[in-house]
Amino acid sequence: MNTPCQLDAFQVPLGVHLLSGLVEKFSNWWVRLGNLESATLRDQLQGLAIDRPIYVSGIARAGTTIVLELLSRHPDLATHQYRDFPGQFIPAWWNRGQNPKPAPVQERAHGDRLQVSLDSPEAMEESLWMAFFADLHRSDRSNILDRTIDNPAFEKFYRDHIRKLLLVRARPRYLAKGNYNLTRMAYLQKFLPDARFVVVVRNPREHIASLTKQHRLFCAGETAYPRALAHMQRVGHFEFGLDRRPICIGDQVAQEVCDLWNRGEEVRGTARYWASVYGWLADQLANDSELAAATKIVRYENLCENPHEILSTLLAHCELEPASPLDEFASQIALPKYYTPNFSEREETIIAEETAAVAERFADLCLIP
C-alpha cells in the first residue's frame, strides 16, 4: 500500500499546471513561437551541426532511464532536463530565465531509487511530436512513423530545436530518451541519417512486474493529485496510470491489450503487449539492415550485472570517447532489490505463454549480448 508521503511526489505546482495547460491548448501558437526563437538565433544555429544524435528507447520500465542517466554524464552530450518543462518549445529563451544554482535532489515519483532534480536528464520530446502528428497515442490506429512519412514543417522545427538545445547546453551532440521513438526510428534515420539508436530490452517477467507496480502507483498518485494526470498527458507519458495507452503497431493487438486490461487481466494484457512491441521491433530490424546497423540492443539485466562492459559497447556504438563520470555512475548500477515479482503459478504460465517465442527470437537473432 502506498503511504501519503510516497504519493506526495505526485504534486504538481499550480503555476506549472496552469502554464503547461496553456502550452497544451495552444500548441500551434507555441510552435510558431519556437520558430520565431529559431529565426532570432539563425546566425548562431547555422554554425551548429547535428552530429550523430543518440536515441534511447524501449517499452517503459525496460531500463531506458538508467541508460539515459549513464550516457548523459558524457561531456559531449546535451539532453533535455526537467527544468525545460513547460517551456520545451522555446528552450533558448526559457533557459535564460532559469536559476543557474544546483537544484535540490529527491527520489522521483516512480519510487525506483533514482534521485532527480531540475538538472536531471528527462524525456521531453513527446509534446513536440504531438504538436505535429495527430493521433500519435490512439490505440486503434497505427502509431508507426516510418520512411514513408514526410513532414517538412516538423523536420525543420525539430532540427532547429536540437540545435537550440546544443546551444543552450554548450555541447556538440544530442541525446534523447523517448520510449515512443521505438516506432519512429526509421523515420528519424530518414532525415537524420547518422543517428544512433539504443533500445533496452528487459526480461519479460521482471519487466511485467515493474510495469504492473508502476501502473498501480501512478493510478494512486493521479487519483490523489489530479494535476499529475494532466501533467502526464501534457508531457506525453501514457505508459501507466489512469490514462494508460498501449503503443499500436498497426494490428489489433493494442485493442486486445486494452480489452484484457479492462477485464482485469493485467498480467496477460501486459505480457501480450510486451511480445507485440518487441516482436514488431525484431521484424523491423531483421528487414531493415540500415536501421539494424545503427541500433544497439541492450539487455537490462546485462547492464546491471556487467555495467562497465556494457558501457564500453555503448560508447563504441555511439562513437563516444570514454569519460570518467560515466565509469563512476556505472559503478552504482545494480539489479533492483526494493521489490520482487510476486506472480501466482497461473500468472507465471501466462507470461511464458505470451512472451517466450519473442524472447527466444531475440536470442536467436543475437541482438542481446
Image: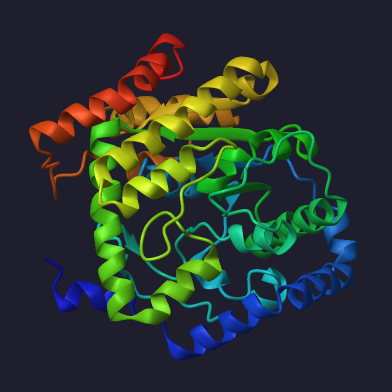
Q: Is residue 256 left or right of residue 79?
A: left
Residue positioned most to the top? 364
State which quadrant residue 148 falls in.
top right
State the image coordinates of residue 96 (x, y, percent, origin top left). 66, 79
Question: Relative to the observer, which residue lies in front, 9 or 121?
Answer: 9
State the image coordinates of residue 167 (x, y, percent, origin top left). 72, 61
Residue at 52 percent across and 72 percent down: it is 83
Q: Is residue 57 left or right of residue 69?
A: right
Question: Relative to the observer, which residue lies in front, 112 or 351?
Answer: 351
Question: Relative to the observer, which residue lies in front, 238 or 19?
Answer: 238
Total numbered labels: 0
State which quadrant residue 249 falls in.
top right
* Residue 266 at least partly seen: yes
State which quadrant residue 7 falls in.
bottom left
Residue 275 sits above or below residue 362 on the image: below
Task: Give the quarter of the figure containing the C terminus.
Answer: top left
Residue at 41 percent across and 15 percent down: it is 361
State the image coordinates of residue 204 (x, y, percent, origin top left). 30, 32
* Residue 67 at least partly seen: no
Residue at 51 percent across and 41 percent down: it is 57
State the image coordinates of residue 40 (x, y, percent, origin top left). 87, 73
Question: Relative to the observer, which residue lies in front, 246 or 69?
Answer: 246
Residue 323 sits above or below residue 288 on the image: below
Residue 128 sits above or below residue 332 on the image: below
Q: Is residue 329 left or right of residue 246?
A: left
Task: Give the quarter of the figure containing the N terminus.
Answer: bottom left
Q: Is residue 104 left or right of residue 51?
A: left
